[in-house]
Amino acid sequence: MKVISPRCEISSNYSNHSASLRGSGTQDPPRTFRDLGLLEPLCEACDSMGYRTPTLIQAHSIPVALQGRDLICLAETGSGKTAAFVLPILQALMNRPQPLNSLVLAPTRELALQISQVVEDLGALISVRCAVLIGGVDMVSQAMALGKKPHIIVATPGRLLDHLEHTKGFSLRYLKCLVLDEADRLLDLDFGPILGRILKILPTRTRTTFLFSATMSNKVETLQRAALSNPIRVSDSDSASTTRQRGTVSTLLQSYTFLPLKYKDLYLVHLLNDRAGQTGIIFTGTLTRRRESRSCCARLDSLRFRSTANSLRMCDWRRGKSRNLLIATDVAARGLDIPSVDLVINYDLPSDSKTYIHRVGRAAQAGRSGVAMSLVTQYDVEVWLRIEEALGKKLDELKIPISDVLVFAERVGEAQRVAMREMRNLQRKQGNLGSALRGKKSGKRKRDDMDRDEL
């Protein structure tokens, strides 16, 4: 078959008749964005964003996307995948400007907001218009944004279907490009039936489709057969990819601290105090314990650590405009491209090694060094041993004398009392809304709530 580039070759030995594009073991140094075929204004935009050379995924996928081929891209968070599909879309718009040209579907509100920010940053020089359709936001204001005929729509599936069904005059019959980002997570969140309804509405013959996923499960295979036509499959098979699959990168310094549960906040404050000014993510429990992230944020704010657990502020945090610390559940471990994180702290341990690797992988991205620390209580020993077994190594224990953490007892105690009052006030303001909604849902989330991030 035809060779696309010195780094990437195509073969068609796949039962699903899709071609495959993989990095070879001996690859040339990364080329410039100009070498990928991008127009000068987009190269200038990349330069202004600090993108000096294409990542491996970008070098593999952008030339294929510029040819107008359907594309399956297996890429992890932090690989530069967002720019890999945004840049070809922007180039198509430069060649032929058209309202409602492209649609990007993302599984969560957070990811949709992040993608829209990348679109606006890279498309600033060409005045691209982008609209975001997500749950939890007034549909009328979104309909007004659609009325301005944006070039690109970034949406979560449930809210997009609401607009397709109920917003007068809104149609995607002339859509040229569809992107399914984090396709595996889209399906994990049970968006499958909604995606099926959306695909029936969208045009097929005139549409190019890009599917991005961290894994290729049976569900994703089924989706790609329904949504894509003779796609080229792109994956990163270099040594870094192998490292991600097996464990963590060598530039990441990992350790744990064994501590009594009752002193957990004291140890957290001690660790943060030693690393004041660093950018970090503190992971708390997920789903039923998501309130812990807000409570933890309130406690840290009382101690004058600049933190946020507010999902709508996450893009500002990512761009360095707000706080130093992000308190999050596992939604931030995948799907959110958050650069330059110095520190990851597992305040609550994840339940499995795969989630642990995703969490700590937020530090030490793109060759940088980073630190990951885990707080292990007497009730976490079994889980921690399973994580170490899966990693294939014993991690270093950071021993902190109890006398060093007890000096924070008075300050932390007062912060806990302040946080408790704030959480009670918040619950009173919310009233019984949460209970009422849970009763109506009968165990299933409504369409408008399916894209809600558990933060």
Image: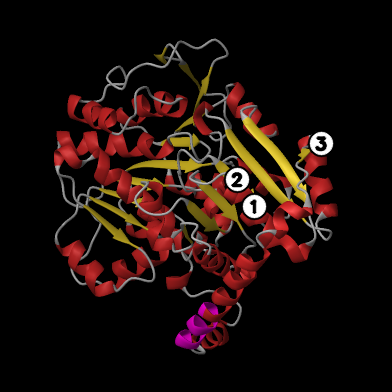
Quote the CA–CA distance across marks 3 and 1: 24 Å
Going from N to C along the chain, the mark reached first, 3 or 1, is: 1
Q: Report the residue marked by disc 1.
A: 270
Element under disc 1: helix
Nearest to the eye among marks 2 and 3: give it. 2
Looking at the picture, how far across and down is residue 422, in whole percent?
A: 51, 78
Task: Report the residue at 40% width, 48% height from top.
Answer: 318
The local crowd at label 2, few if under 14, some if 14 to 19, many if 20 or more residues have their Cα within 10 Å, is: few
Q: Mark 1 is on which residue type?
A: His
Going from N to C along the chain, the mark reached first, 2 or 3, is: 2
Q: Report the residue marked by disc 3.
A: 394
- Viewer-proximal residue, 134 or 312? 312
Quote the CA–CA distance across marks 2 and 3: 24 Å
Q: Main secondary structure of the magenta part?
A: helix
Element under disc 3: loop
Quote the CA–CA distance across marks 1 and 2: 6 Å
- Tag 1 near tag 2, CB within 8 Å: yes
Nearest to the eye among marks 3 and 1: give it. 1
The local crowd at label 3, few if under 14, some if 14 to 19, many if 20 or more residues have their Cα within 10 Å, is: few
Q: Taking 253 as reference, is 138 above or below it? A: below
Q: Mark 2 is on which residue type?
A: Asp
Looking at the picture, how far across and down is residue 77, in whole percent?
A: 51, 40
Tally of numbered tags:
3
Q: Mark 3 is on which residue type?
A: Lys
Q: Taking 165 as reference, is 327 above or below it? A: above
In-image side of 139 versus 5 (left or right):
left
Q: Which residues are magenta?
A: 422-430
